[in-house]
Image (tube, coloured by chain):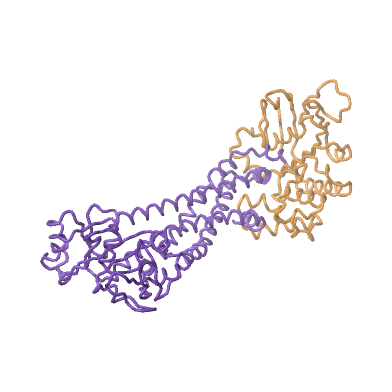
């Protein structure tokens, strides 16, 4: 199996909100091997989504450093370009554009990077076909069911054939059958592409699809699924 | 390349129509105001051309034809200038008259060429007895007069001897009467307001102008085809019309800006998502500018028929026909170009807002 994913290393990440009153992340160290599937678990407000946003370069840490494929994100001159080429993001709430059809939503990442619209359309169409949504490609997002929207959002994250997918509660707003399908899609992508998958979830069943689990509690990271926390766990060595 | 832009415009019809209305109204307003200014200019030019004279003389310091005063001695001096063939005295009075707030009355000599070139559509020419007048067809229609009617104006009773038509709105929207009657009625005494001068051949025009300028410096002489363009009042009117047009476009720019601004705020999540999936700031800027450009171009062009409709209304529904706008191709091109520029200027504030937007914050806001 090809291991073409992005290696992720984070060290000493700190992030606060509201002028330091809320500590979202506290000295978080994290290392993810290329092609690894990591689940990040933790209660609401534990800093999971904040960590994902930092990894996606949608936000920047107050302290600490993140490396993607060995390169510090502070040296990546155009995060948007990096995301367009290497990254797929699945948001907790699908964030589809309601006035666009399913296939048009899937096309968006590639449209932003240029290229022939016809080719991009064909690629997005084929992807939706393969995910079982071929019959709904021309339906506007506003008229898709919740499950169809989330599958479309997953397709949008995969359409650029990314090396890293960050998924924030990808199954959190859908029924169990759709959730399982979404996991199968991500699993298939991970297996075929060898990409790195980082998935935030509350659900232990979802987490069980991953190779490894990191838990966050009060902004601190712990190796494994943690119920009662005493000591932070050191980041794993690769 | 217009993938998202076209869908944003076509699939959000309410926003699109509202913005287009703003640009259309601004563009149409600008074109109409320019057309009105140009029309007023052209009407007077056209009316002067009907006289067929070579030169127009009026008091040098007079702001308008109806405030000009030329004494009989000056008329005699003009007649004695070498090369002058004929001098025609005209009294022009703009006044509240026959119930109209702004009405132009021409006092003409019986042998005036205007009378010869006017078509009598009802009745007969007036007699030079000071008790009759002819009314232009547009004015007659607006006031409700017909040949044979009797009217009282400024304490005098007049017989409407006839209704005339010259195809010049400024003339057809007024009335003509005997020169002496006009002098008396509008208290000009023995003075004249404007004098039209015919010279003996085109080669003599410059020489006659030079003599008049040298010997009668209190008078202002100009070629009849240039008279209106040198007329300060028309210049002011045209500048005023253009100024109002610019104001209308300023409102347009603000309308576009406000609509796009609201749109940007409404679309925070959308723009943030585009940033999140890899759209660069430059591409977002292109998106906003293209949408603004589309509004401006389409709004500029839809402003043309609206302006044409308003101009038609001014020409055909205007009471006395004083304002007769002319929508020339030059005005249309200028209107569209300026509307596009106004729309693009209006894009700038929302564009800055969009580019300052943090992707994560916007995503969290939904």
Q: Quadrant of residue B100?
A: bottom left
Res B328 visible: no
Q: Position of residue B172 (x, y in %)?
A: 38, 70
- Is residue B126 or residue B204 the one in the foreground? B126
- Image hue for chain A: orange
The answer to whether residue B97 is above or below residue A149 is: below
Q: Where is the N terminus of chain B found, in terms of image quarters?
A: bottom right
- Image hue for chain B: purple
Res B23 visible: yes
Rendered residue at 23%/69% (across/down)? B53
- Is residue B186 or residue B358 the one in the foreground? B186
The answer to whether residue B259 is above or below residue A44 is: below
Rendered residue at 80%/43% (across/down)? A170
- Is residue A86 or residue B231 the one in the foreground? B231
Q: Quadrant of residue B349?
A: top right
Rendered residue at 68%/39% (across/down)? B362
Q: Position of residue B197 (x, y in %)?
A: 20, 67
């Amino acid at each position: 199996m090809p291991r073409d994913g992005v290696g992720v290393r984070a060290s000493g990440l700190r992030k606060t909100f509201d002028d330091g009153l809320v500590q979202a992340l506290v000295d978080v160290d994290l290392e993810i091997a290329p092609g690894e599937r990591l689940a990040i678990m933790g209660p609401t407000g534990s800093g999971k989504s904040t960590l994902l946003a930092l990894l996606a370069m949608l936000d920047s840490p107050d302290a600490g450093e993140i490396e993607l494929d060995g390169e510090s994100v502070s040296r990546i001159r155009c995060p948007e370009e990096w995301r367009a080429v290497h990254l797929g993001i699945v948001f907790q709430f699908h964030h589809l554009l309601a006035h666009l059809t399913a296939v048009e939503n899937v096309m968006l990442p590639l449209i932003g990077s240029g290229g022939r619209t016809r080719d991009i359309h064909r690629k997005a169409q084929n992807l939706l076909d393969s995910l079982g949504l071929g019959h709904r490609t021309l339906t506007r997002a506003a008229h898709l069911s919740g499950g169809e929207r989330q599958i479309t959002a997953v397709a949008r994250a995969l359409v650029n054939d990314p090396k890293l997918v960050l998924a924030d509660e990808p199954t959190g707003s859908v029924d169990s059958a759709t959730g399982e399908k979404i996991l199968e899609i991500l699993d298939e992508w991970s297996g075929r592409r060898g990409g790195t998958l980082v998935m935030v979830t509350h659900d232990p069943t979802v987490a069980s699809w991953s190779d490894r689990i990191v838990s966050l509690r009060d902004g601190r990271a712990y190796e494994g699924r943690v119920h009662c926390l005493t000591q932070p766990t050191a980041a794993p060595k690769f | 390349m217009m993938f998202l832009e076209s869908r944003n415009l076509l699939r959000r019809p309410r926003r699109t129509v509202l913005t287009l209305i703003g640009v259309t109204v601004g563009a149409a307003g600008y074109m109409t105001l320019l057309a009105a200014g140009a029309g007023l200019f052209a009407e007077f030019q056209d009316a002067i051309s009907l006289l067929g004279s070579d030169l127009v003389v009026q008091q040098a310091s007079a702001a308008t034809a109806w405030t000009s005063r030329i004494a009989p001695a000056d008329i005699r001096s003009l007649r004695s200038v070498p090369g002058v063939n004929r001098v025609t005295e005209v009294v022009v009075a703009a006044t509240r008259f026959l119930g109209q707030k702004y009405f132009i009355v021409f006092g003409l000599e019986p042998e005036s060429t205007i009378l010869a070139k006017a078509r009598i559509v009802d009745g007969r020419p007036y007699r030079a007895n000071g008790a009759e007048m002819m009314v232009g067809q547009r004015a007659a229609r607006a006031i409700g007069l017909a040949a044979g009617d009797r009217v009282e104006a400024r304490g005098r009773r007049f017989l409407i001897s006839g209704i005339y038509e010259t195809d010049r709105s400024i003339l057809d929207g007024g009335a003509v009467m005997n020169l002496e009657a006009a002098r008396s009625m509008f208290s000009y005494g023995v003075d004249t307001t404007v004098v039209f001068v015919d010279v003996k051949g085109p080669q003599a025009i410059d020489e006659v102008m030079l003599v008049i300028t040298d010997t009668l410096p209190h008078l202002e002489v100009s070629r009849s085809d240039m008279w209106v363009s040198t007329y300060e009042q028309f210049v002011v009117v045209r500048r005023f019309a253009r100024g109002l047009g610019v104001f209308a476009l300023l409102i347009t720019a603000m309308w576009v800006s406000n609509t796009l601004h609201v749109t940007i705020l409404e679309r925070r999540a959308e723009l943030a998502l585009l940033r999140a999936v890899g759209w660069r700031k430059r591409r977002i800027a292109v998106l906003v500018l293209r949408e603004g450009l589309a509004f401006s171009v389409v709004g500029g062009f839809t402003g043309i028929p609206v302006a044409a409709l308003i101009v038609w209304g001014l020409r055909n529904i205007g009471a006395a026909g004083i304002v007769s706008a002319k929508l020339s191709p030059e005005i249309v091109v200028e209107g569209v170009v300026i509307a596009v520029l106004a729309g693009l200027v209006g894009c700038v504030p929302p564009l800055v807002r969009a580019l300052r937007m943090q992707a994560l914050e916007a995503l969290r806001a939904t």
